[in-house]
Every structure is written in C-alpha cells, then in structure tokens.
Image (cartoon, coloured by chain):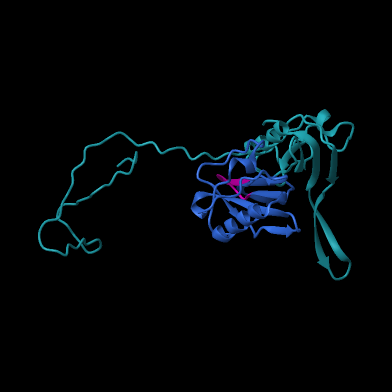
Amino acid sequence: MADFPTISPDSISFELGGMNVSEAAAKTVGGVYFRHSLKTDNVTCTVSFQNILSSAVEEIRNHYFARGGSSLPFGVNHSSFWGAINVVPTDSTYRYNSPPEEEHFGVYNNVTVSLLVALGAGGLASSYILVGEPAQLGSLVAFSSYAFSGTAPFILDADDADPAVAASLILNAGGAGS
Amino acid sequence: MSSFITVPPSQRVLIPGEAVSSQLQMLNGDQHNVRQSNATLNHTLRLSYAALTNLEAFSLVSHYFLNGVFYGFDLPSEATQGMSLTIPSGYLWRYAAAPECESSSTSTSASVELVLKPPSLT
C-alpha cells in the first residue's frame, strides 16, 4: 500500500460524513432512525496543492494510476499531509474520490485532489484482487478421430437408442479427467 | 488529415482518466470498490491559448471541422510539453466539444477540451 507522496498541501477542506443511519417513515411519530453499524463513513477531504513543480505533479498522477484510480486504498504521511490539523485518526486509510485535477501554468502548477477517508483501520483497508491466471493445459493424451462416412443426414439418437454395446465418446477439455 | 496546431498552450488542465470500477456502499458502513478492467477512460485535457494569430486560429478551427467529435487524432508534443504524460498505446484524443474562440482585432484566444479514448472507440 504505497503512501501518498509526501507533499504538503496548501489547503484542506473536509466533509465529516456521518453515521451509517437510515430513516423509515412512520405516520404516528415521524421518522424512525436505524443505525446499522458503529462506523462513520463518507468522510471526504479535498486537498489543494499550489505552485508545485511538474515533478511533484507527476508524482501525484503516478500514485493515482498505481492505486488503480479510486480502486485501491493507501495511507498518507500524517504529519506532512495534515500538519497540525487533528481531524482524522493517524491510521486512517484513503482512496481517491475522483481523478486529481491538474492546472499547468508553465514551471509551477496547481493540483486538487479529492479523497475518501476511512476513519481508523476501516473498510477501505482490505482489498481483494482477483487475478485471472492463464489456464494450464493438462498433459497431452493421444486420441482417435471419428469421421462419418455414408449417406447424410447422420442422426445421433440420444433417447430411444438401445445399442447392443454401450458406447461413449468423451471429449477431454484441458485437464478434465474422464 | 490536418494536424493539431503546434502552438504551446498558455494554460493547461489535465484530469487523468478513471479506471473502470464500481463503488459499493455496504449496509454496515464499509465502502468497497470493484475494479473491472485495467483500462483508464476519459482522460480530459483542456488547453487554453491566449493569443493566436489569425492563421493559427484558422488552423485550429479547420482541424476541428475535419475531425469533429468523431475522429481521433494525436497531439503534437508542444501541447503536452513539460508534463511527462504517458499516453497508453493506441489511444487517441478526440474533441469533447467544439473549441471556444474569442477574437479581437489582432488576435484570438481559444480553449479546447479533449478526451482520450481507447483504440476501440475511435
């Protein structure tokens, strides 16, 4: 889990999200609220970097791509990122909420990044990566080919057929056993 | 087919593309994200030109008329110089909308919004 580059932002704005609550309408007492867990979610922060070099812009962009856009979680260097602001626990995990927006003016550039924050070691910390590996073929097996000869059409009876000797034709697919 | 103008832009905005993924909000508060592909879609590049000559403005407009929002094209290195942007192989830029131009008696300022598309969509 590669951390966010250690670049100190110029400003941070954040939305504190809320408890995981839903409301059910009730005629007699108004809305009834259900709290589904002890988590607080949808905490987001928008971070602005002003007048940073192109190399720092590239560092943020590469980190964004390395995290698969908004797919994979990551940490931040708490002291360089948040400075003296004490809003979220230091072990919080983050994910990109949207692509970073870069403004290029020549030598110095501005970048705005929106992040989703999981307070503490929460739901964003785990990631499951399903990898579709190349299929492995089984060992080679000799086979016989059967060609139809005679007069078409050829009919394969699958229900009423009653052959004197039971016949079977097995097609092995990959490493499938007979 | 004409080429995109080789004038360096005076200002540039890049919004990198988003990997193909879906966000899932769980009832217990977990927020999961399922990534479906390695492709990134919709890189957006906004180029602003402060003072184009009439010839450069004509070149920009005619390039748009030839390509519209339909045909993809490559950008010259001047458009992305200094930003170390790596374009995935086979991807092409396309106009997201018509360029906006504002002309005075001596020069034209213009802004162009482009979107990067995978090979199959151009």
Q: Nearer the viewer, residue B52 or A38?
A: B52
Q: Is residue A156 left or right of residue A71?
A: left
Q: x, y percentage for residue A35?
A: 81, 52
Residue B76 visible in image: yes
* Outermost residue toward the left in this view: A150
Quick one: A153 or A81, which is closer to the camera?
Answer: A81
State the image quarter where residue A108 is shown.
top right
Q: Magenta part of the protein: which range? A: B34-43
Q: Position of residue A110 (x, y in %)?
A: 77, 40
Q: Measured along the vertical axis of the image, is residue A150 above or below residue A138?
A: below
Image location of residue A80, percent across then percent down: 82, 29
Direction bottom: furthest residue: A27
Instruction: Indicate the colour of chain B.
Output: blue
On screen, residue A176 versus residue B115, left or right, reads left
Q: Residue at x 62, y 58 (%)?
A: B61
Q: Which chain is depicted cyan?
A: A
- Where is residue A40 drawn, in percent x and y? 81, 45
Characterize the magenta stretch by its predominant secondary structure: strand
